[in-house]
Amino acid sequence: MTPSSRLSGFYKRTLQERRQTIGDWATLTPEELQVLEGGSGLSAEQADHMVENAIGTYALPLGIATNFTINGTDRLIPMVVEEPSVVAAVSNAARLFREGGGFTTSSDEPIMIGQIQVLDLTDLEAAKQVILDNKALLMAEADKVGGSIVKHGGGARDIEVRTFESTSIGKMLVIHLLYDTRDAMGANAINTAVEHLAPHVESLTGGRVNLRILSNLSDQRKAKASGMIPAAQLATETISGAEAVDAIVEAGVFAEVDPYRATTHNKGIMNGIDAVIIATGNDWRAIEAGAHAYAARNGQYSSMSRWWKDEDGNLRGSLELPMALGTVGGATRVHPAAGIALKILGTKSARELAEISLAVGLAQNLAAIKALATDGIQRGHMRMHARQLAVAAGASHEMVNSVVQAMLKEGNIRLERAKAIVAELDAKH
Ligand code: MEV
């Protein structure tokens, strides 16, 4: 039986205790635990192997979101994020989904798209046909340079052709290589394959190939998460569960119809998704680009998620996005903390990681729109803001809580006041 991710009061434990709990959960070695203590987990020497002109590293907080149950398995979620409240809010939302049986997730096969741009053609339809007639040959060529991905059962799956009859630079043919990258994000494999295919495409079509590059709109590689929250769980001091369900559905529809709201709503979703992606050493710009493009697939930028009330009056939500993630290759293997994050998640599968990320995105979205549609978000934010001010005012670790409580009680949350309280407390000791 997997242990429970419902770690009640986890936030009240000391850093050391939390690390120990996670160490036990993921059977981390003493060396791995030390990586978590060591600032960024990445040495300057390792950084030097990752980027050019390295001069050091830049650390961010790594937190653990609790309470997730996904397809019946409990998961603890490592999240790298600089924004206060994100980890607490998502843990809280996951607890609500837990009351409705947790998240259900699914995903496509890990199929990426590589694009080849062909120009200087007179007859696009004839060029398209010759490519389709030679699909098998081109796919076999792509697999020749597939290396370990092909050995692991991945490789070319299909070829599609799109035509642009009239662009400002004339006729354009775009070839899509659909390629299964298994547990890799696959950018290198795809780019290698399309570069290798380019001369074959030129000799088949008589055209000139310009770009050969993957598409970050990886809409063949989507993941999906959905879940239910019993209405009663959403009741607050001021509104009933039924009213909260309606208000949250209204918030969801606002984002469906209005791009100005959709942008902020989706930013909230990506707060959760990016944090998991960064923790696992994946390329969050690729995920961001693909997710926002997918949100505009019907011609207008819209909400990434859907929220509705079911026939029992409970709240249901779902989220579907392209999710090109890897658990092998790239920074996932170079960054020591990324390997630890995967160990904490308890997965080696890119598809599973994609599905978990979507569950986190859905929970993060719920946390935000629930707060916005009920209490407003400033109440929770002010507590975290007070914390940051207390630290900035020089409060010692032991003193922070007292400074925060005093400022919240007074309703006076300013740096000057924090400094004055710190001085008062210092004088008493
Ligand atoms: C803040 O980082 C994210 C929110 O603005 C998201 C939203 O408005 O739904 C709270």
Image (tube, grey):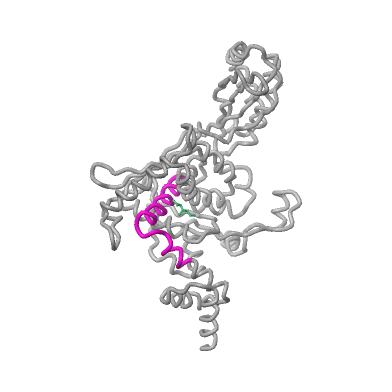
Q: Is residue 35 above or below residue 265?
A: below
Q: Residue 56 at x, y = what percent?
A: 71, 58
Nearer to us in this view, 326 or 289: 289
Is residue 360 a member of the stretch shown in magenta?
Answer: yes
Q: What's the magenta bit mostly, secondary-structure-wise?
A: helix
Residue found 40% across the figure and 61% down from its top: 7
Q: Residue 214 at x, y = what percent?
A: 62, 32
Q: Residue furthest right?
A: 53
Residue found 70% across the figure and 14% down from its top: 206
Residue 4 visible to the viewer: no
Q: Residue 22 at x, y = what percent?
A: 48, 60
Residue 8 visible to the viewer: yes
Q: Residue 42 at x, y = what percent?
A: 65, 57
Is residue 301 a member of the stretch shown in magenta?
Answer: no
Q: Residue furthest left?
A: 312
Nearer to us in this view, 301 or 272: 301
State how many labels appear. Answer: 0
Image side of residue 71 versus residue 162, left or right: left
Q: Is residue 200 above or below residue 4?
A: above
Nearer to us in this view, 180 or 377: 377
Q: Is residue 102 above or below residue 66?
A: above
Range of residues picked out in magenta: 358-384
Q: Quadrant of residue 328?
A: top right
